[in-house]
Amino acid sequence: MSSSTFTRDQFPLVHRLRVRWAEVDAQQVVFNGHYLTYLDVAISEYWRATGLPYPDAWSALGGDIYARGHQLAYHAPARLDDWLDVGVRTARIGNSSITVEWALWNDHRLVTTGEAVYVHVDLATGRPASVPASVREQIAAHAAGAAVTRLSLGDWATWQSDAMRVREPVFVVEQQVPASEEIDDDDPLALHAVLHNIGGLPLATGRLITAGQPPGEARIGRLAVIKAMRGSGAGRQVLRALMQAARAEGAHTVHVHAQTSALPFYLAEGFEVSGTPFDEVGIPHVAMVWRTPSA
């Protein structure tokens, strides 16, 4: 492993983190064992970026991955408040094993390099199992810079099952919205968007309602992303697809009742606050609107 020649551009995922006080030892440098924690943080981001959020994507395929071995080499120390860049890539995939190479830099200095071997295990048997073809495809697509997700638009009859695989854990379980209020009369009338990974796992969803709205207006709602994919851009993909569909139907004004925690997300996409905060199903919301420049 010629790891000392690693450069950032060799890694499809580079995650930045900052050294904390608790990670520095009596020698005033990062304690050696913490570098595996840095790897663990970065590899979680790597799986998210490949469209294989851990553990959701793996358990959906009936499996999990377990660390089998690590090799590390230390090239320079890291200290309190240093910004560290951790690069991660899949070096090779065997029958049941996945070998990951990683490197960590502080600015231009190579600090640590390593190799980690994971074994894919069948959850039903507890035994090593072949790495699924869809996992191999996700990793290859990410390494090539290709899309690792697929977005579909359609009616409720087509996408109810997949949409609810996102909405139920987000709204009913996580946010404790009554199940009786989660599905409503607008669902059969709406256009639904569902974002999947290549293997077909639903990652995010949302809906567009034009029926019953004033001419040229539409409403977007039920936008949800599974917890493990938040911050990945999945929600933005769904929102932009629904906005494009709204414009295609002639809408110049789009309304949304946004949870106040999502206010920065909608503001970044061109929405404006159009009302005062209010409570909806026990969660603070605010009315927002998007208008075309000529509307």
Image: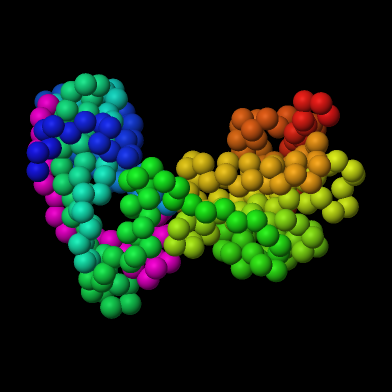
Q: 48 and 274: which one is in front?
A: 48
Residue 31 visible? The answer is: no
Location of residue 206 with respect to 63 vertically, above or below:
above
Answer whether residue 144 is visible to the viewer in this image: yes
Question: Looking at the figure, which quarter contains the N terminus?
Answer: top left
The quadrant holding residue 173 is bottom right
The quadrant in which the C terminus is found is top right
Residue 199: percent from left, percent from top: 44, 62
In magenta segment, residue 70: yes
Residue lying at the far bottom in this picture: please name it: 125
In the rendered structure, the answer to whether residue 142 lies left or right of residue 240 reads left
Location of residue 72 (image quadrant): top left
Q: Quadrant of residue 55?
A: bottom left
The part of the chain drawn in magenta is: 52-76
Q: How many marks?
A: 0
Q: Measured from the top left, where is residue 223 in percent x and y?
A: 64, 49
**Residue 62, percent from left and from top:** 37, 71
Residue located at (25% from left, 36% from top) = 10
- Percent x, y of residue 54: 38, 55
- Which residue does the image show at 45% across and 47% down from the upper left? 147
Please say whether residue 137 is one of the residues in the magenta stretch.
Answer: no
- At horizontal 22% and vertical 71% (from top left) the residue drawn is 128
